[in-house]
Amino acid sequence: MTTQTPPQVASPLHNALSRLYAEIQGDQPSMAGALRSTCQQIGGHDVWFGSTASSWAGDLNGYSANLNSSIAAAVAVVAQALACTPATCTPAEAKLENIFLEGY
């Protein structure tokens, strides 16, 4: 007795994750460096100076580092989700994935 393998279709979830990964990875450098120029301006005393400016520049540098690591972590999470999601699935699974992606 042989069992038939159900037909396979492209996984909507895998496709959505692939698009998200490409977008977030492509935007990673600009998002991670979004505060870099401001940090340089404040830290270089080009736009503001004094003890308050130094304190604010220190905080801003910390936020910039946190932003960079957060963006890298987001890319890693999406990459892991993509790696765990098969590229194909059954039509019934695809229907459920579409429902999930539509937010129902």
Image (cartoon, rainbow, N blue to C red):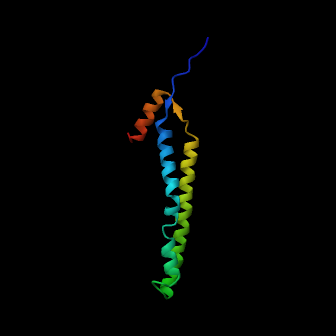
Which quadrant: the N terminus? top right
Residue found at the far front of this picture: 26
Task: Residue at 60%, 13% (x, y): give it.
Answer: 2
Is 1 positioned to the left or the right of 49 in the image?
A: right
**Count of marks overlaid on the render:** 0
Q: Is residue 11 above or below residue 39?
A: above
**Spot occupied by residue 8 in the image (x, y as percentages of width and height):** 51, 27
**Image spot of residue 64 (x, y percent):** 52, 69
Residue at image x 48%, y 39%? Answer: 13
* Residue 45 position within the rendered picture, expressed as x and y whole percent measured from the top left: 50, 85
Which residue occupies the foreground of this view, 63 or 87? Answer: 87
Identified at 58% across, 16% down, the residue is 3
**Residue 36 appears at what percent x and percent y?**
51, 71
At horizontal 49% and vertical 35% (from top left) the residue drawn is 11
Q: Nearer the viewer, residue 72 or 62?
A: 72
Q: As displayed, is residue 101 above or below residue 21?
A: above
Quarter of the figure with residue 61 = bottom right
